[in-house]
Image: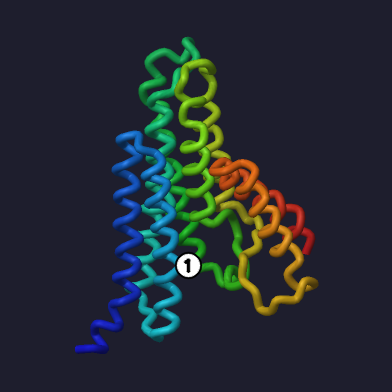
């Protein structure tokens, strides 16, 4: 009986990730963006601990892997896509677009589909044991969540009729980055030597500075910095 309970601990934690994603979607649809971001972050915490618990308890399973991908797509794919959809509904659009502006926000859900593809590729790609190929879904979710929370009023005050279009174009770009064959470093340390982890240390230190200077906007800036740093360092190897 005890063994059965222990085996289900990682799946229970993964389910908490899934629930957080569902709650984030609900908040996003009601335009409560800070709460949506909070539950995306909580989902990321559960996502970290489900894998750790599976390794510590030696109870990884095929069901756990499938459940993990499902939970991640909801929390890091559907939830940020819902935030973009929700805010794009309240943006103003150029007058020549006309009634098409009622349907354009639905394009945001392309992000959820590409997140699912990204997760499926990760499950099958043996190259991603120590680094990533393409933008990780949690990084994508944090970028959009922080961007929308930090600039909600700017996007929706009606002063610029191109913000909605810009957000959707950004969604397409980041959807491509999710599945692009671009190596990106992971924050995994085999040792603490500066020479072996120089890029990671630089990233961590600059990330702390960005948060201190920019606040919540710093999260989005960190993700952009992560992409740039990966492109210019990992692709030279």
Q: How is the image coloured?
A: rainbow
| Element carrying mark 1 | helix
| Residue at mark 1 | 123
Q: Position of residue 157 (x, y in %)?
A: 47, 20
Question: Badge 1: few (under 14), some or many (20 or more) residues near its Cα, within 10 Å?
Answer: few
Residue at 55% in and 28% down: 166
For residue 228, above or below residue 102: below
Residue lying furthest front in this view?
212
Q: Decide which of 36, 22 is in the foreground and name it.
A: 36
Residue at 52% in and 16% down: 159
Q: Is residue 164 visible?
A: no
Q: Position of residue 131 (x, y in %)?
A: 62, 67
Q: Position of residue 167 (x, y in %)?
A: 52, 32
In this rendering, position of residue 193 left or right of residue 27: right
Q: Position of residue 6 (x, y in %)?
A: 29, 83
The answer to which quarter of the image holds residue 192 is bottom right
Residue at 35% in and 53% down: 21
Q: Is residue 222 visible?
A: yes
Tell me the quarter of the image containing the C terminus. bottom right
Residue lying furthest left in this view?
1
Residue at 34% in and 47% down: 24
Tell me the quarter of the image containing the N terminus. bottom left
């Amino acid at each position: 009986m005890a063994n059965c309970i222990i085996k289900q601990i990682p799946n229970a934690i993964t389910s908490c990730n899934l629930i957080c994603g569902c709650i984030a979607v609900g908040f996003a649809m009601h335009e409560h963006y800070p709460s949506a971001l909070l539950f995306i972050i909580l989902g990321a915490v559960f996502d970290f601990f489900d894998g750790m618990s599976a390794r510590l308890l030696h109870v990884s399973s095929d069901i756990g892997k499938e459940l993990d991908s499902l939970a991640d797509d909801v929390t890091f794919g559907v939830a940020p896509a819902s935030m973009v959809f929700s805010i794009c509904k309240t943006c103003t659009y150029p007058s020549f677009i006309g009634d098409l502006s009622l349907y354009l926000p639905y394009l945001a859900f392309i992000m959820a589909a590409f997140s699912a593809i990204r997760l499926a590729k990760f499950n099958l790609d043996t190259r991603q044991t120590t680094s990533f190929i393409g933008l990780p879904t949690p990084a994508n979710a944090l970028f959009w969540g922080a961007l929308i929370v930090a600039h909600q009023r700017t996007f929706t005050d009606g002063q610029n009729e191109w913000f909605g279009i810009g957000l959707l174009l950004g969604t397409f770009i980041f959807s491509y980055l999710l599945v692009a064959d671009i190596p990106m470093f992971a924050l995994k340390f085999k040792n603490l030597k500066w020479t072996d982890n120089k890029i990671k240390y630089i990233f961590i230190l600059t990330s702390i500075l960005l948060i201190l200077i920019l606040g919540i906007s710093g999260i989005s800036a960190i993700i952009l910095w992560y992409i740039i740093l990966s492109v210019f360092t990992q692709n030279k190897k």
